[in-house]
Amino acid sequence: MHNLPKSFRHIKLELAREKDHPRGDGEHGYDILAPLMPDGKIDSEIAKKNRTKCRVRRFRPNEPDAIGLLLNGPGGRWSIDYDDTRPDDDEAAFKFGDEHFTLGEYVSIKEDDGKMHTFKITLVQEL
């Protein structure tokens, strides 16, 4: 975590309540390193300048962690890319450019099962 701009934060997402997880699931989620503006939005300019430093770790029970990059694509679309040689492994980070990454808020990610899941922001921490 050396040489990161001061605006970078550790953001933790945990699966929110849904049909198969009525209490949510703290063992299914994401750890994200990304630059945030004071209002909690992702700073896309700093993210573009530090593309390889915007990291993601997906964790799930009984699966190895998946490590990837949080990428800002055409039209302001955000995605999580786990293998830059395969376009079929990306997960859509739904409207991440509009979200405020603040404690207790919710964000959505279309995971590799093809379904949109909602995650609660449980940590936003300075590095």
Image (tube, rainbow, N blue to C red):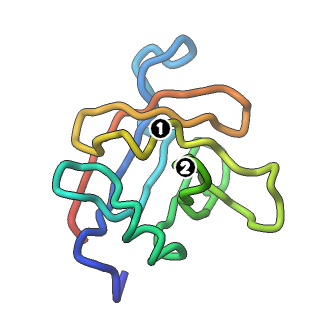
Residue plotted at (29% across, 49% down): 41
Q: Is residue 50 above or below residue 39?
A: below
Q: Where does residue 119 sit, x and y in percent of width and height? A: 43, 33
Mark 1–mark 2 Cα distance, whole angstroms, equals 7 Å
Nearest the camera: 96 or 114? 96
Quadrant where the C terminus is found in the figure: bottom left
Residue plotted at (37% across, 71% down): 46
Nearest the camera: 72 or 56? 72
Instruction: Identify residue type, mark 2.
Output: Trp
Quadrant where the N terminus is found in the figure: bottom left
Q: Is residue 19 above or below residue 47?
A: above
Q: Quadrant of residue 106?
A: top left
In the displayed image of the protein, which residue is found farthest to the left?
A: 38
The residue labelled by disc 2 is 78
Dot 1, crowdedness within 10 Å: few (<14), some or many (≥20)? some
Q: Quadrant of residue 125?
A: bottom left
Q: Is residue 91 above or below residue 65?
A: above
Instruction: Identify residue type, mark 1.
Output: Lys
Q: Where does residue 111 sit, x and y in percent of width and height? A: 65, 37
Which element carries disc 2, helix, strand or loop?
strand
In the displayed image of the protein, which residue is found farthest to the front?
A: 75
The residue labelled by disc 1 is 95
Q: Which of disc 2 and disc 1 is earlier in sequence?
A: 2
Mark 1 near mark 2, Cβ–Cβ under 8 Å? yes
In the picture, measured across the screen, residue 84 lies left or right of residue 103, that is right
Q: Where does residue 108 sit, x and y in percent of width and height? A: 49, 32
Which element carries disc 1, helix, strand or loop?
loop
